[in-house]
Amino acid sequence: MLVPSTSALRGRRLLVALLPLLLALGGCALGGEDSRALPSPSLSPSPLESADPSEEPVPDDPGRDPALRRYYEQDLGWNPCREQFECARIDVPLDYDRPSRAKISLSLLKVPASDQSQRVGSLVVNPGGPGASGIEYAARASTTFGTEVQQAFDIVGFDPRGVGESTPVDCVADQRLDAFVAYDPDPDTAAERGQADRLLREFGRGCAQESGQLAAHISTVEAVRDIDIIRELLGDAELSFFGASYGTLLGATYADLFPDRVGRMVLDGAIDPSLSNREKSLVQAESFETALRAYVGACVDRGSCFLGDSVDAGAQRIRAFLDEVEQDPLEVAGGRTLEAGNAVLGIWYPLYDQSSWPILDSALQSAFAGDGSTLLSIADAYVSRGPDGYLDNSLEALYAISCLDTEDTIAMGQAPAVVDEFEEVSPTFGAIFAYGLAGCSDWPFEAERKPAAPDAAGAKPILVIGTSRDPATPLEWAEALSSQLESGVLVRRDGDGHTGYHRGNECVDDVVESYLVSGEVPRSPVDC
């Protein structure tokens, strides 16, 4: 799988995804979520709908223009769903520059505050991705947020435009998605690079053909403008927001665009919006290598490690295994195979949470013995693939949104020239991230976002959390974002895995919950 380097990777918890397979791995916001399978809300995605074509293009004052009034003044009708929650759909313009031409719909889910006498307001949440479901994230609020937060807030999740139960982007059939995921993410021959180019071109053209103009209008900036409509419809003068991983880019962009409407905002596992595609990928490659070495180191420290007697030996054993799978994929029951792309994802996913490392031990030991089924199951969970096909459109949304946010891409043929630089910081994964720079080279739509440092001048204090050995969003990104934001307050967590809140660190949890519930702001950076 050729990884789009603008993504912060997954924003879901693997414990939820893999329990049906008797596994327990973790994703971008991993660790301790409710593991019960949740049914989908009783909502269905809606197609594009035409609106009144008489309106003129709107000016640049986001959220204040009369042309958007009907979206800001629509009724928000909550209906009971899933027995204990409330669901709603709202309309938003497909194109904010021409809000009259077409509209799409967003799906929302609310978990009412458990103690109405203590209610502070609404907390809008996003788990990351891009492409992860916000309604599923909110539905797991009982295990994702602390008791005081649940008592004080209606926790509101939404599927961003193009995602899940909102008007969804669609690109290719499941069989082609399988080929896309399995393909060697390190195409180090001309023939492999040619095939990678064809797969990427097919994916982009499929998005354009199957989704039309929707695929051109699912950028981060447009999703942020949707969030402001949600805020207004919730009846809140200010947005209280919790964003994890890619959700931090949504939050930071919102704060920069609407600083006077920021309430209590937590950005956990932060992305640095100022970095170029190449800069971001290089740091992320190094962070995944650091996480891998931490995993191997824990194995070595236990003694009799199946990977070897040193961290270097263990990392080399994993690299040798990936080379072997590239040359000779492992047969798996049901007529499937573990190929290079699947194997990489199967290793990456457990690195997001230290509690998942024992499962990676088991998966690798089995794979070394010729059984790739567990590693393939992990990779399947990463891309939301079930036994009979893909369970949602999160993979398609991840690529489509990432590519709309990626202005500085390179051609596949240019990638070999940067491989050495990437492998210097990441011998195991560097080439994968180097070739990922070309992941959006054939995207058929113009990128909407340029790298820029947000200052959100005038916004209320914003809490920014980073974790020291986070593989997907390195601590230095949180440090950078907190300094870019005029009112940023940094919280550093010393630990492994992705994101910092509600992962067993009482220091982080106390700071976040005191801030959200009572508005208590640390006077200086906090080290946990």
Image: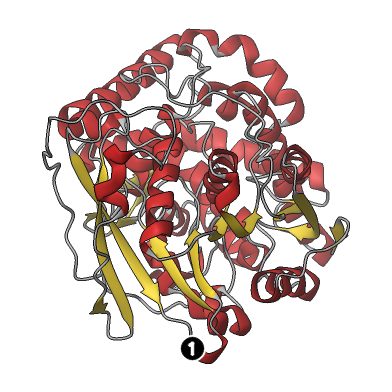
Residue 147, above or below 106: below
Q: Residue furthest front?
A: 66
Residue 211 is left or right of residue 385, and the answer is left
Question: Percent position (x, y) of residue 152?
Answer: 56, 81
Quarter the N terminus occupies: top left
Question: Percent position (x, y) of residue 15?
Answer: 50, 69
What SS does tag 1 mark? helix
Tell me, what colour scheme is on the image? secondary structure
Residue 184 is left or right of residue 30, and the answer is left
Question: Percent position (x, y) of residue 83?
Answer: 27, 85
Q: Is residue 427 visible?
A: yes
Q: Which residue is mark 1?
A: 116
**Closer-to-camera residue (406/386):** 406
**Closer-to-camera residue (341/111):** 111
Q: Name the residue type under label 1.
A: Gln
Residue at position x 77%, y 76% in the image: 506
Question: Percent position (x, y) of residue 405?
Answer: 47, 29
